[in-house]
Amino acid sequence: MRDPLENATPDVGYQTIEWDMLKPPDERVMPLTHTNQLKLSEMSVRPDRELTEYSLVDADGTTYTQDDLDAVPDTPDPAALNEVLTEIASSTGKPRRVALAHLAKMAATAPDACTAAVEPMVDLLDHSPPAVQGEALNVLTEIGKSDPELTRAGVDPAVTLVDSSTHPLLRNEALQFLAVFATHDPTAVTAAVPDLAVLLQDESTETDTTARILASIGGSQPDALVDVVPKLELFLETERETAHVWILTAIGQLSKEHPNMTVEVAPTAGELLSADEVPLRSNAAGVLADIADEYPTEVKPWVPDAIELMEDSDKQVRYNATSILARVAAEHPDTVRPATEQLLAVLDDELDNTRFNACWALERINATSALERLREVAATDSDGDVRSVAQLAVDNLED
């Protein structure tokens, strides 16, 4: 007789299966679509119905009932940690996987009490089945949220798992762990940059998590992103999502250090100036402002858009817009001169840096009509730097 589980086992992780007791024994099992998950700790078994039963099955064909999952308390006691770790170390198959699910719930509720689990979890990342690796990464992620330094030993093994050949469910667990650690020490995950850039185009990958890691790396190691700028730009041309904000952040950080490496991104960033989402508008304007610091001519086409953004409801958007105008005005004052009215208006802006930029821009476009207002700012503005640049603008315009 054919094994009823023959066509029901998942490639990795766990699949919910339905047992139809009215059918012949070798035809009773049907896998339920869209129920495949990597971690046992996040699964449950549907209640049985009359003549229909449910269970889980793993990639080895081992089944799990609700009784098996009930062995994992909803509110596990951290005092049982040593017992759980012993079970993980000494058992295999179902007992080990249930113990791992138990540990995962412990780490989620009391990560500080689970620090002794770090070393055995790192060991499990080497040559274990994907479901075991995924649960181990889950534990490391939870502990890392509390104290990331404790989980450093897991970084290198996790980096190897973000390769495109890794199963997407496991790869996403590795990304979640690396995203947590990257906020602590981005330099430790720079080796993953080439794979991360490739994964931005992979529909099975959590692009938001991938982009957050790249943004973290860009914040401290922008040079690590130089070789992947074309892939970052390509991603920005896809349908807009939250990840675009993070990628723009990464590009912006690189453009501060190497504007020559990001100047080709200017057209794509320019298109995002009209985005409905405030973070996208803001970060796009920020990237263009950084590029304009060295390449104002390349940013000149987006001056009209920057002028419109001067009236944006978001203060950071207004600041980035004035940065564009002040920097482009240094070489192309005639292009920025139509912004005179808007620049005068933001001399009352709540951000000191926005008022500072406006003073510079008005001086660079030779806005003599702004003299009286600039004298007032030089005398009364609450910020000393703004008063100083306003006075400098007055002196130059009077000359």
Image (cartoon, rainbow, N blue to C red):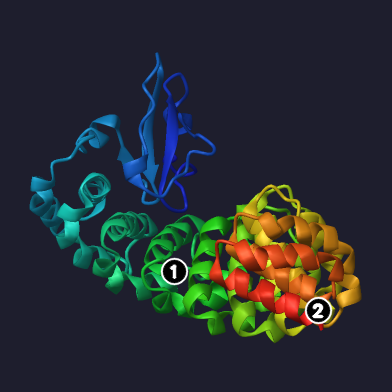
Question: Residue 4 occupies which quadrant of the picture?
Answer: top left
Three-letter amino acid code at disc 2?
Glu
As helix, strand or loop, the secondary structure at mark 1 comes to loop
Q: Which residue is more in the foreground, 355 or 265?
A: 355
54 to the left or right of 371 = left
Let me know if residue 248 appears in the view.
Answer: no
242 to the left or right of 90 = right
> What x and y, as percent, mark residue 229?
66, 77
301 to the left or right of 50 = right
> What x and y, as percent, mark residue 3?
41, 41
Residue of label 1: 161
The residue lying at 47 percent from left, 43 percent from top is: 36
Looking at the image, is 107 positioned above or below residue 225? above
The residue lying at 39 percent from left, 61 percent from top is: 180
Q: Nearer the viewer, mark 1 or mark 2?
A: 2
Question: Residue 375 occupies which quadrant of the picture?
Answer: bottom right
Residue of label 2: 398
Let me know if residue 105 appears in the view.
Answer: yes
Q: Earlier in the sequence, mark 1 or mark 2?
A: 1
Q: Which residue is more in the foreground, 22 or 297?
A: 297
Question: Residue 195 occupies which quadrant of the picture?
Answer: bottom right
